[in-house]
Amino acid sequence: MHSDRASFGLKLAAGAGLTFMHLPILLIFVYAFTTEDKSYQWPPPGLTLKWFAVTWERPDVWEALSLSVRVASISTVIALLLGTLCAAAVARAKFFGRETISLLVILPIALPGIITGISLRAAFNLGDIPFSFWTIVLGHATFCIVVVYNNAVARFRRTSGSLVEASMDLGANTFQTFRYVILPNTATALLAGGMLAFALSFDEVIVTTFTAGQQQTLPIWMLEELVRPRQRPVTNVVAMVVVLVTFLPILGAYYLTRGTESVAGQGK
């Protein structure tokens, strides 16, 4: 009789893989509580909660966190707007060069980050655009759009076009069709794409290095702190925050995109 249960060897391999991936993250959490402030000793000589209070009082941490949240939020809004419109055009219309446009939209996330960063920096220099908050936003939006586009175009393709036609036939205008037909069928995909875009922007380092000038987002601040260590456990406390901030949107996106086979009109 065939069993759907995984074998012991497969479970062991899966557990080893998960341990390999997540053990470094667990070490970051442990070192956030260490009493040693200059090096990473194992096992830690002692455990303390004082670094959380120290981190709370550090104004440079709050400045970097504020910048990262603002950049990620605006980049996500831009990505939702442009990524959704582009996905709707590619999924719903037939025109010359459609597949080429789809490839060009996806290309930024396939390229190495350093290539994107160098390209953006060259473009800003060529246009005499000074580095600012908005140059970081534009840099992050280039790859955030891809995340939203991928989620949106997949959902548009799974939603039957006959639903829109039926809505129009029944007298609904464009706004009503969008509100009552298109949005309910695409909302979870857009929300998931937005969450992933926010998480991707929040912890981005390479593109930010080329577009930020003298500004420091939270990941850039962490990199600087590791190069010139000062109260090293503070960096680990901030790393815990980054893990939680990026993990929650990814988890939310996972739950939102489950069961997409139930999209209305799919297969009809």
Image: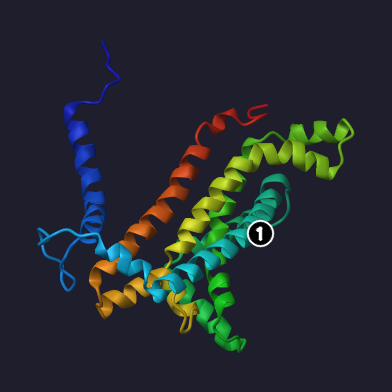
Estimate the x, y position of residue 172 in percent, counting from the top left: 86, 36
Tell me if residue 42 comes above or below residue 191 in the rendering.
below
For this orientation, the residue located farthest to the right is: 171
Q: Position of residue 42 (x, y in %)?
A: 10, 60
Report crowding for label 1: few under 14, some 14 to 19, many 20 or more residues within 10 A (C-alpha).
some
Residue 15: percent from left, percent from top: 21, 39
Foreground of the two, 95 or 73: 73
Nearer-the-camera pick, 224 or 131: 224
Image quarter of residue 11: top left
Q: How is the image coloured?
A: rainbow
Which quadrant of the view contains residue 96?
A: bottom right
| Looking at the image, residue 258 lies above or below residue 142 | above
Q: Which residue is mark 1?
A: 82
Q: Label 1 amino acid?
A: Leu
Q: In the image, 65: left or right of 262?
A: left
Q: Is residue 202 above or below residue 260?
A: below
For the view shown, which residue lies furthest in the top direction?
1
